[in-house]
Amino acid sequence: MNQPNDKQKVVTRFAPSPTGFMHIGSVRTALFAWLFAQKNNGTFILRIEDTDKSREVEGSIEHIQECLKWLNLNWDYGPDKPGPFGSCIQSERLPSYLKYAQLLIEKGLAYPDPYTSGELDAFREKAKTEKRPYLYRDHRPETFLKWDGSKPLRLKAPHIKRYTWQDAARGELSAGEEMVDDIILIKSDGYPTYNFAHIIDDHEMGVTHIMRSDEFISSTPKFLSIYDALDFAYPVFVTLPPILRDDRTKKLGKRDGAKDILEYRNDGFLANAMVNFLALIGWNPGTDQEIFSIEELIAQFSLEKIQRAGASFNEDKLLWMNKQHLKLFNESEMFDYVKKALPQSILNQPQYSEDRLGRLVETIKDRIQSTKELTLAIEAGEYDFAFSTPNYATDLLKWKNDKDIIAVLPRLEEAVRLLVDADFSTAESIKNHLWAYAEEVGKGELLWPVRIALSGKNQSPDPFSLAWILGREETIIRLRLACAKIGE
């Protein structure tokens, strides 16, 4: 594999177009490039490829930066931090592309396209009729006019041959001469094409390793033609496996539910969990380990362990992984995570307090995989009991074996007597005060009405946890309210 020698510093880059959406696959490309740079004490560059102005979406450059910052994929040079090579925004690097375009003209390896769009359409139609691939080089003019910028500038492909190259992930790859053509370098609007601009930028920025998706394999001979025309050394190409839908039938796309990466942040996914998850889509550490810190990923990452086959995006696995990272939170971190997800409606409830919220968090933390499901539970009113007196029908207090509601009253009155001076330091200590009586009269007969009195719901945390969350005073108040409802 064409690894850099000891004197050649590793330089990688992530070069998205500012089109307004950060696909999970794009972020995975950025992650792999960043990890490899970190592993080798190298440089990671964020470059904005904005030469196709028709596709640009306002605010996208800031959005791209926000996405990477969330994941802590910090860059050494970027749109906010020019390097010794100048700007990292392509539209601000036009003189550089014109310089190399002029060099190719002087070498006789670039020329202005003399044809109209109608003539080009006729060439394509003829090739279609003759059932052969359309190649512009078949119509290359015998003599070249002087380029004045009003016409597209094309490469005169220096070698019409089968290209073979090494890929760090795929091994030896090759493509026939039909993939080599006189492609456009500079458009008539003065902007370079992607094919030309990214090669100039990578050369001037000293990029040693290029991580990209497999859709670029077929275009690689065209890229190599430009490298050859300019006498540039090839970088190390690293083709990443495609990210597939969960059913593995096709690549994951917007129509398949692919979301912008920041939507996952808004749903309460942790940055470390997302990085961990993405790293394992198409990279295999060679062990059974699944939960990694950033430091562990950097230490273990290598190009040799990048897989060739496509890897599926499984959101259930992402949820599980997020939960594993949540388990690493200390009490304060978990409290902040839940509080940040609370709507104002909860904060405005009459009994809201951070003390009670802390006990609720301690009780429900093992049930949480993300704040999205927490938000859904809050919207469904599942946790209203913690911050407001529940409203429920009196008949709900009756256990299924009770003949009438009056049978519940003495059991609730005894629960009040047992808890009024009880130890409320833990849910377990509360249980210890009620358990013997529950076994005496029947667990359902006691614990069901206690649960309803405290939460107003037939599905909630267990009654001991409910009492611990609410505290002694509120627990006694709610049990006595239930007794009063029965006595009415």
Image (tube, rainbow, N blue to C red):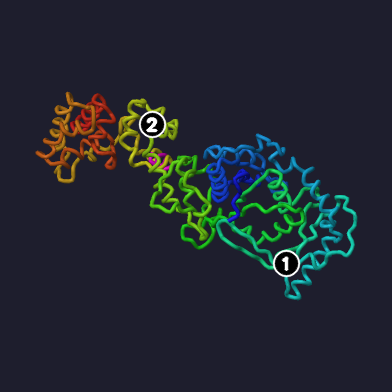
Q: Is residue 415 left or right of residue 475?
A: left
Q: Between residues 195 and 52, which one lies in front from this camera angle?
A: 195
Identified at 80% across, 50% down, the residue is 101
Find residue 452 and name its label: none
Residue 229: percent from left, percent from top: 77, 56
Q: Is residue 315 left or right of residue 25?
A: left
Residue 21: percent from left, percent from top: 60, 46
- Position of the C terminus, as image quadrant, is top left
Mark 1 — residue? 161
Mark 2 — residue? 335
Identified at 80% across, 68% down, the residue is 138
Identified at 58% across, 41% down, the residue is 42
Q: Is residue 52 above or below residue 334?
A: below
Main SS, magenta residues = helix
How far apart marks 2 and 1 lie (CA) works out to 63 Å
| Few, some or many residues within 10 Å of mark 1 (<14, 14–19, 20+) | some
Q: Say which amino acid is labelled 2.
A: Phe
Sequence-wise, which precedes: disc 2 or disc 1?
Answer: 1
Residue 236: percent from left, percent from top: 62, 53
Residue extent of the magenta highlight = 372-377
Residue 30: percent from left, percent from top: 57, 46
Q: Between residues 422 and 428, which one lies in front from this camera angle?
A: 428
| Few, some or many residues within 10 Å of mark 2 (<14, 14–19, 20+) | some
Q: Between residues 281 and 63, which one lies in front from this camera angle?
A: 281
Identified at 22% across, 27% down, the residue is 424
- Of all residues, the one furthest to the front in this rendering is 6
